[in-house]
Image (spheres, coloured by chain):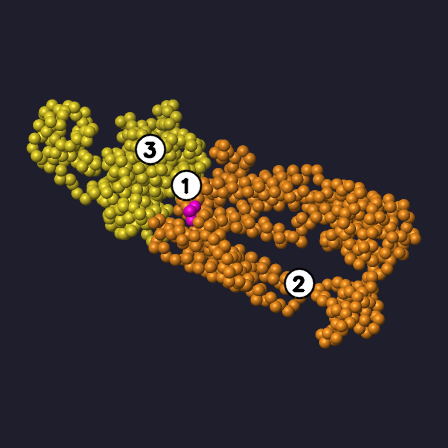
Chain colours: A orange, B yellow
Amino acid sequence: MIRKLFSLNRPLVPGFLKKFDAKLMANYPLIWSLRVHLVLWYALILSLFTSAYFYLKPDDPRQDSEVYFPISVMVILAIIATVVWLLFLLRFNVFKRFGHYKSFQGCVSLLAYFISALAIFALPFLPSIIEDHRATKAFNAKEIVEDVNTMNIHLAHLTYDSLVTDWYRDTVLVSDTLAERGRNYENGPYAEIEYGLDSAGFGKVVNRIYCGKRIIAGDSFQVLANNCFVFLEVPDYQIITVDNRLESTGGVEFIEPELLYFKIHKEHDQIKLDEASKAYFTLMNRYNNPKLPSEYNGEAFVTSSHYRDEFVARSSFYLLPYRIQAVESGIENITDRQFLVSSYNLDFILRLWLYPSFFLSILVWMFRHSTTKVFFLSLLVGFIISVLVGVFTALFNLSLSESLIFQLMIWGALLSLSFLSSNGMRNVVRGVGLNLVFLTVFFIPLLVNVIYWEGKSDWPYDYGIYSKAQAASMFRAEWIGAILVLVFLYFIAFPLYRSWYSAPEA
Amino acid sequence: MISIENPVRRSLKHGDESLAIRKLLDLSYESKKAEFQQKAIEISRNYRKNDSNSWKEQAAALSDQICSEPFTPFNPQKLIQAVGISKKYKGSNFKLNPVNLELNQGEVFGLVGENGNGKTTLLRILAGQLKLDEGSLSFPSFGAVDGFSVRGRVAFIPQRIPRWYGFLRDNLVFSAALSGHYGNENTLMVDFMLERLNLAPYANLTWDQISSGYRTRFELARILLFKPGLLILDEPLANLDINAQQTILSDLRDLAISKRSPMGIILSSQQLHEVEKVADAVIFIKNGGCFYQSQLGDMNESVIELETSASREQLEAIFSTDDVRIRYNGSYFSLSSSSLSGTELLEELIKNKISIQYFRDITQSTKRFFNA
């Protein structure tokens, strides 16, 4: 059956592509033999069919996403497509026929494999992209933020009698020197506040920087003495709380608790509760997760922990008719879908796409330029070396830097092995060394980069700056790695593969 | 510049139509002119259709036209030089003893010997597939090129043809493109090979759909499109019927002396008579060593093969002298003599009214060593 399948004259390929294929074969045999054009075509066909299906499939973005099932299906499809592509690649091999094939052609082959692998590995991302697009099209981020603000105002008015009106108080002592802190320690424990503006807690000793930040960012404050401050925080009126990433995409901010506080207490007398109720329920029906039962009242999400008990108590009685959790669930589902592919996870998604594609293309290149025996032996040796490195690292309790330096040394040894003279023979050891060096050359700049940053672990600046600089450096190292692969292939690996493969066997 | 005689007219005159077509195609190829090649392909197609005899006039006219063009004879260069090459496999008792060999462009070299005596080993060493233990191997006409380029110019067709995929024609198009024939030239060369090796009816078939004999022809066509300098064939006649064997051998002979892309050919075979007919030199390999090389000198003993209803005693009565030795292998007799020639031995048999079913003078043939 497989033979019959392969002997079919490509029923899904249109006439123009068949003509193009014939022209490529007669004029550019190397490019033709790589089958990039067919991979791109079939990937396009598959993408169109699956995209159409995912677009037309009935789906309510307020419900829980079921995208992981189609992703799994697409992963299986991508694996099948990869196997079929590899089987077709077995048919014609310019290198193994000792055709016109030099370093440049070697690099072109690698890039062609990469493009093909990118096309195949893009398939599993399609369901997410389409789901993201459908959710974004159905619900605008700006609209969601505005509606949430409106719902919170209505809710506050509708439950006005049960609102907490007491402001939260946080009284602290301010001390700038360690000695003073030590003395004051007896009066109250020193607050270890490293980041942010978390509440210090009653009677805690804080430094002046923290105090300054709280004064700027807090809702209000009171000075009891030169070194004694009371920070005041309004109760949390943001009853419906959703993903705050919507603010940046929608360009509108959620109303802060203190503004809500003032707005509600100022306007409450003029509000017609019937109209507010009607308006709220209209919006509630728009956003609530229809899959959740009417009595659903899940775990309350409270942004500020100070009023947790009060809020939970209120939720179980006053807020119950308003299905807050169902609304939050609906909006969370919408935003989850909208952020499936976004600037927040783009780095991760791109790496998830590029890395497997890149390594598949390197593996395919290796397979097409070495014997079957040496290829699989290389994979086995690579696995054994990885295990040994792990054992060695654990056994000698090596630090990350030491372990990476050890791995660099192994790479150097493999490189030497691939240069070793094999008395003019197609030596298996040399072939394995060459394959492993080529497979891992991309990682060399990354390893060096990690070793460099490990040496900077006592970075004196803010952690955010540190992690940003480290991420930027890693990104540069990845680019350098990709370029290094091509340069290494052109000047070193390809001539070595050429001489190794053409040498006689023992 | 010289003119050549017209082999097409000569073949047509004697009714050798298939040969005439092959000669016409070869002439068109030698001319290096695409228009002649295209016309020859058309004529070959008409011949295959067999609907009229008009192709004969067209073939004669075209061959006249081609033959009137001046040809530049090629100057054969030394292709391969092997000095004392030997090989021993690890963990095996077999050893290929030192062999010397020289081959020029346009020459055909036959390699004969019983199974398991080292023919394939020697061929694989010459093709660069196996490392030699001792001796030297050089390709003087290739110039200073690396091993990869040498492997690209030395074609090896193993006894078991490797499987290929897709359609026969596609494979030829790919091979032609790999050797630098692009666009229209590619189509022309593929069509030419399909006609020349009689593969045209099978162009759109796959590996599974053609016989092993045509697979051999396909492999030959594919390799020839690569324009190799040296062609090495391991038992190419093994899968062919007797007619196909003779056709392939004469094709190889003609292709070797092609003025457009001359090559040297080394082939191994068990079909001694057929190989000896086309080979310029023959090596007989026995027990891993070069037992006889036909280039090296004449034999000092005549040997004939004889199949007869006469008994051994009758033959011994005729050749009573010690000089004639008679052997019988259960199928036929072999008679050897240092004083009588093959013709004289035959004359004696006829004179004594011995009925003869089969006779062959194998004095100059390596077949004699199989009987030894």
- Prevailing secondary structure class for the magenta stretch in the rendered image: helix
Contact (Cβ within 8 Å) of mark 1 with mark 3: no
Q: Mark 1 points at which residue?
A: B175
Relative to residue B282, is residue A311 depicted above or below?
Answer: below
SS at circle 3:
loop
A371 is within the stretch colored magenta: yes
Question: If you read the primary sequence from the N terminus, does the residue marked by circle 1 or circle 3 appear first?
Answer: 1
Image quarter where the N terminus of chain B lies is top left
Chain of the residue displaying label 1? B
Q: Mark 2 points at which residue?
A: A464
Relative to residue A277, is residue B320 depicted above or below?
Answer: above
Callout 1: 10 Å neighbours few (<14), some, many (20+)?
many
Q: What stretch is highlighted in magenta?
A: A370-374
Closest to the observer: B190 or A502? A502
The picture places residue B228, in percent across and down from the top left corner, at: 35, 44
Callout 3: 10 Å neighbours few (<14), some, many (20+)?
some
Closest to the observer: B67 or B273? B273
Residue at screen point 58% across, 64% down: A453
Q: State the image quarter where residue B113 is shown.
A: top left
Chain of the residue displaying label 3? B
Chain of the residue displaying label 2? A
Q: Name the residue under label 3.
A: B239
Residue A246 located left or right of residue B16: right
Direction left: furthest residue? B321
